[in-house]
Image: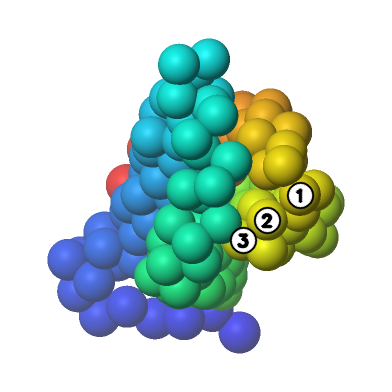
Amino acid sequence: MALNFNTSTGTSLIRLLPALTSTTLLTYAFSESLFLTPFMHPTIRPQSNSFLPPYFARWLARAKYVIIIGYPATFLAGAANLLSSPGQFATKLYGTGMLFSLAHIFVFGPRMLGLLEDIKKGVPEGDVMGSLGTWLRINWVRAWTTDFLAWGCFVGAAAASL
């Protein structure tokens, strides 16, 4: 059953929504690396071991909402497009973008959440920066292999369907 959007504005909005939400998530992923990498610098690193656990506890309490809202919103917007017959090529792109978006959560999520918990709890004691370094490396890979590819699919799907 296809959804029927009665206005061209409504159709355009639903076509663009996955591109917009995935842009937000991609920007967020790169911002995380941008703002957390300086803690790895040798001149700051010794202080970061004691500073990061309470900082991460505070940061994660707020940052989680980007993930909790962003990825389901992107997935649901992609699904709405699949149900609204955007055309064969756009349908493939929306579907592929949804898969990349899911990969962010289900392929990388458990390991990344574990590392964030380690940092928040100060594990391993005396070398929280090891956990952060691992998290930053995986975050970079994840951003390029899931978020960037999802974004490209959703932008391409919007362009193909508008």
* Residue pictured at 36% horizontal, 49% vertical: 24
Which one is in front, 89 or 22?
A: 22
Q: Position of residue 25 (x, y in %)?
A: 44, 49
Which colour scheme appears in the figure? rainbow
The answer to whether residue 39 is visible is: yes
How far apart in space, not on screen, are marks 3 and 1 (Cα)? 11 Å
Which one is in front, 47 or 64?
A: 47
Task: Quickly name the residue at label 1.
Answer: 125
* Residue pictured at 47% horizontal, 48% vertical: 51
**Secondary-structure class at tag 1:** loop
How far apart in space, not on screen, are marks 2 and 1 (Cα)? 6 Å
Q: Which amino acid does label 2 sit on?
A: Gly
* Residue pictured at 56% horizontal, 56% vertical: 53
Task: Quickly name the residue at label 3.
Answer: 120
* Residue pictured at 61% horizontal, 61% vertical: 120
Q: How crowded is mark 3: few (under 14 residues within 10 Å), some or many (20 or more)?
A: some
Query: Residue 161: which disc?
Result: none
Farthest top residue in view:
42
Q: Position of residue 28 (x, y in %)?
A: 40, 45
Mark 1 and mark 3 in contact (Cβ < 8 Å)?
A: no
Q: Which amino acid does label 3 sit on?
A: Lys
Task: Quickly name the residue at label 2.
Answer: 122
59 in relation to 45, above or below: below
Q: What residue type is labelled 1?
A: Glu
Mark 1 and mark 2 in contact (Cβ < 8 Å)?
A: yes
How far apart in space, not on screen, are marks 2 and 3 (Cα)? 6 Å
The answer to whether residue 90 is visible is: no
Q: How crowded is mark 2: few (under 14 residues within 10 Å), some or many (20 or more)?
A: many
Query: Where's the N terminus, which quadrant?
Result: bottom right
